[in-house]
Image (cartoon, coloured by chain):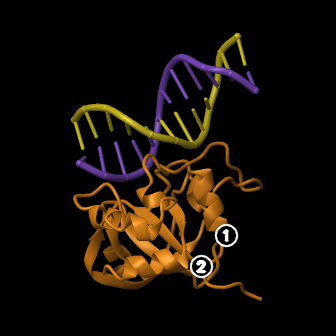
Chain colours: A orange, B purple, C yellow
Amino acid sequence: MSSRKRYWLMKSEPTDFSIDDLERVGTEPWTGVRNYQARNFMRQMQVGDGVLFYHSNTQVPGIYGIGEVASTAYPDPTQFRKKSKYYDPKATQEQPRWDLVDVKFVRKFDRGIPLDEIRGHAEALGEEFALIRKGTRLSVMPVTAAQWKVLLALE
DNA sequence: GCCAACGTTGGC
DNA sequence: GCCAACGTTGGC
């Protein structure tokens, strides 16, 4: 009873956690998402869904590789840890506010696909694609099968 | 329920 | 490091 595979894009600052880090550890709980829209997207994720790994806040922002959703959503443990930068005093074990999924390494691109270049394909990707829509800062967003195909063709 | 103040994201 | 664009918070 599983629905069709879906696709997502997840952003990370490489100084915090990069595609190389993911390659090293294999699977990583995607901690620290503190935006409801992004959280809700993670709640929709299914094991096996495709993930585009995006590096933000870096010299050349862009997509650097691929991962795979390795768990369904569960409470982000960092919300309960006082010493964590992701600590949320309003979250309790009984009523967690934030979820995460585990993300598994699949492969790293030979070269990153720069945001610049992605913008150049706005027409094929569609106006509604959150990554290139002005003013959108979502860190987790859905990617359609068509968009996935367009993006992978740029690799 | 409005909205100003504040914090964060993320490209540049 | 700057700052525009957002999201969240909290006083009222």
Tag on residue A6? 2
Q: Position of residue A36 (x, y in %)?
A: 62, 52
Q: Mark 2: which secondary structure?
A: loop
Instruction: Name the residue located 53 percent from the left edge and 79 percent from the top edge.
Output: A145
Q: Are marks 1 and 2 in contact (CB under 8 Å)?
A: yes
Q: Position of residue A66 (x, y in %)?
A: 41, 80
Q: Mark 1: which secondary structure?
A: helix
Which residue is nearer to you in this view: A28 or A106?
A106
**Dot 1 crowding, Cα within 10 Å, few <14, some 14–19, many 20+:** few
Q: Is residue A10 above or below residue A97?
A: below
Which of the 4 quarters of the picture holds residue A39?
Answer: bottom right
Is residue A15 in view from this perspective? yes
Q: Amino acid at mark 2?
A: Arg
Q: Position of residue A14 (x, y in %)?
A: 32, 63
Instruction: Name the residue located 77 percent from the left edge and 55 percent from the top edge.
Output: A94
Of tags 1 and 2, the one toward the viewer is 2
Q: Quadrant of the C terminus of chain A?
A: bottom left
Specify the subunit that label 1 lies on.
Answer: A
Which residue is nearer to you in this view: B4 or C10?
B4
